[in-house]
Image (cartoon, rainbow, N blue to C red):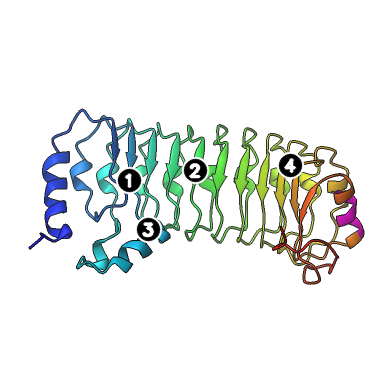
Amino acid sequence: QRPRQDETGRDLFRASLSELVNLERLIISENPISDISPLAGLTKLRQLHVHGLYPNQLNYWLAMNDGRDPDVVFNGITDISPLAGLTEMRLLRIHLNAIDDISPLANLTNLIHLRMYDNRIEDISALAGLNKLVLLWAHGNQIKDISALRGMSDMQQLSLDDNAISDISALEGMTRMKHLFLTNNLIEDIAPLRRLQALEVLRLENNRITSVSAIAGLNQLRELSLARNWSLSDVQPLLHNQGIATGDELDLRFTAVRCSEIDAFADRGVTLLRVTAVNGSGCPGRRLEDP
């Protein structure tokens, strides 16, 4: 009879990893791990991947029905306190778990790349001193307050989709930012984005935005989505942005923007995503599902 994965794999994990004290890079993602205490002594680690299964992978394994306990087929890490002393860490991927406390990350001040999306995180105050971060993916959590991110001037890619954020003033100094994702939040005021002149991709779908004047001067934009900001009607300031032109992508679906303004962007060669008859303005155009 084949040993159960949750009985043998965990013992092997404990016995082997705790001895690898000189290890600098470790990838143990997509495994039945919930206890990462054997990592506490690996103080030379610079890269750690310990994320859970992606949804399509999870569905694949569950469909196999091969006797494994579905509760341990994917990562269920809740406690990351063993990471607190791993201060050499540069890259950390702990997404797709069940983590709600990230305070052990407070001393990991050398972190450059952090993926912690799709967890149960609400408080990100532990990130306040991590000023070397260039990439942070924290979407799919329960974050309301992002003030801890203030001063992270090296940030270039930030994903905060699917949270409960209303105040984005902490982002105003991130002048090196290139990709910013803020979809599905509670944002009304985007004035803090005014100085983010390096922005190339900005996604603001499904918020409460009514004014876009603050981003009128962001002439490096090549992809901008304002879809599902239902009360947004005036995008004239964007028409004055000569950087939004041929080959760029603009999404104004499910807004109240006038057809004449949408057509003005199309005449400029901008690619517009829109749905015939059911977008906010009811403007004619190619259906989204058309080739």
Few, some or many C-alpha atoms within 10 Å of disc 2 (few <14, some 14-19, many ≥20)?
A: many
Q: Amino acid at mark 2?
A: Leu
Foreground of the two, 225 or 81: 225
Find disc 2 in the rendering and name its residue. 136
- Mark 4 or mark 3: name the one nearer the start of the chain: 3
Q: Is residue 66 left or right of residue 159?
A: left
Find disc 4 in the rendering and name its residue. 194
Gap in Å between the C-alphas at discs 4 and 3? 40 Å
Residue visible at 70% across and 59% down in the picture:
188
The relative height of residue 90 versus residue 291 in the rendered view (above or below) is above
- The span shown in magenta is 260-265
- Mark 1 or mark 4: name the one nearer the start of the chain: 1
Q: Amino acid at mark 1?
A: Pro
Few, some or many C-alpha atoms within 10 Å of disc 3 (few <14, some 14-19, many ≥20)?
A: few
Foreground of the two, 228 or 57: 57
The magenta stretch spans residue 155: no
Gap in Å between the C-alphas at discs 1 and 4? 33 Å
Find disc 3 in the rendering and name its residue. 57
The secondary structure type at the circle numbered 2 is strand
Foreground disc of the pair 4, 2: 2
Foreground disc of the pair 1, 2: 2
